[in-house]
Image (cartoon, rainbow, N blue to C red):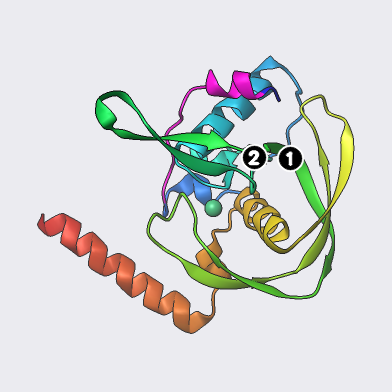
Amino acid sequence: MDLKHIDDGTVLKIFTYPSQVLKRVATPVENFDEELKELARNMLKTMYEAPGIGLAAPQVGISKRIFVMDIDFNRKEKTGIDAKIEYELVDRNPKILINPVIKKKKGQFKYEEGCLSLPGIYEEVARAQKITVEYQDLGGDKHELQAEDLLAVCIQHESDHLDGVVFIERLSMLKKNLFHKKLIKRKKLYEQA
Ligand SMILES: [Zn+2]
């Protein structure tokens, strides 16, 4: 997708855990039409604005099997109007995966993951180090991609979203319990405020 087009996109609302839409198994994309292109563009815009390295459709409230990612971009500081610090995105390399299926998994790789739907939570998750994924592009054409390390982690994390799974569910029982305690505490604080 043309990067200029992405900049014209709309920033969508990001749904946070425990929204119901994050728990649903998303349905396959069947129509490779203008509406789908619009969704992909808006998702990329939303991801870069956040900023994040991946975003799946359920995170913007749409239960369809599509996600976007970019593990290559950087934020460059620049001085804007009134000497205000602004950021400019450089080295962008957007990817859009539709109806992805992970065919092969090899090895193990641990990475401290975060998620735009779980702001402020970072935990180390063990996933496959090398994967092969089959997916369709915006035109419906099929592709195969081999990925490793961070790219493989990102694809596995986003694919999980399409199956109604958030990364904290990949943690050990002990860590999961600690997380839930943290979440309840935070909720109580909000209710008091
Ligand atoms: Zn996520």
Whether residue 95 is visible, yes or no, is yes
Quickly name the residue at label 1: 97
**Location of residue 130 (image quadrant):** bottom right
Quickly name the residue at label 2: 68
Tell me if residue 4 is in the magenta stretch: yes
Identify which residue, 31 or 73, lies in the foreground.
73
The secondary element bearing badge 2 is classed as strand
Residue at 49%, 54% (x, y): give it: 115
Q: Position of residue 140 (x, y in %)?
A: 83, 28
The answer to whether marks 2 and 1 mark residues whose Cβ atoms lie closer than 8 Å is: yes
Residue at 80%, 50% (x, y): give it: 101
Residue at 50%, 81% (x, y): give it: 173
The answer to whether residue 141 is left or right of residue 64 is right
Q: Amino acid at mark 2?
A: Val
The answer to whether residue 150 is left or right of residue 52 is right
Q: Position of residue 1 (x, y in %)?
A: 71, 25
Q: Which mark is residue 182?
A: none
Q: Amino acid at mark 1?
A: Leu
Give the residues drawn in magenta, as a range: 3-16
Q: Position of residue 23 (x, y in %)?
A: 53, 52
The secondary element bearing badge 1 is classed as strand
Whether residue 61 is visible, yes or no, is no
Residue at 49%, 70% (x, y): give it: 123
- Rendered view: 179 above or below 29: below
Tell me if residue 27 is in the magenta stretch: no
Determine the CA span between mark 2 and mark 1: 6 Å
At label 1, counting other C-alpha atoms closer than 10 Å, the crowd grade (few under 14, some 14-19, many 20 or more) is many
At label 2, counting other C-alpha atoms closer than 10 Å, the crowd grade (few under 14, some 14-19, many 20 or more) is many
The answer to whether residue 118 is left or right of residue 41 is left
Q: Of label 2 and label 1, which has the lower sequence position?
A: 2
Identify which residue, 18 or 85, lies in the foreground.
85
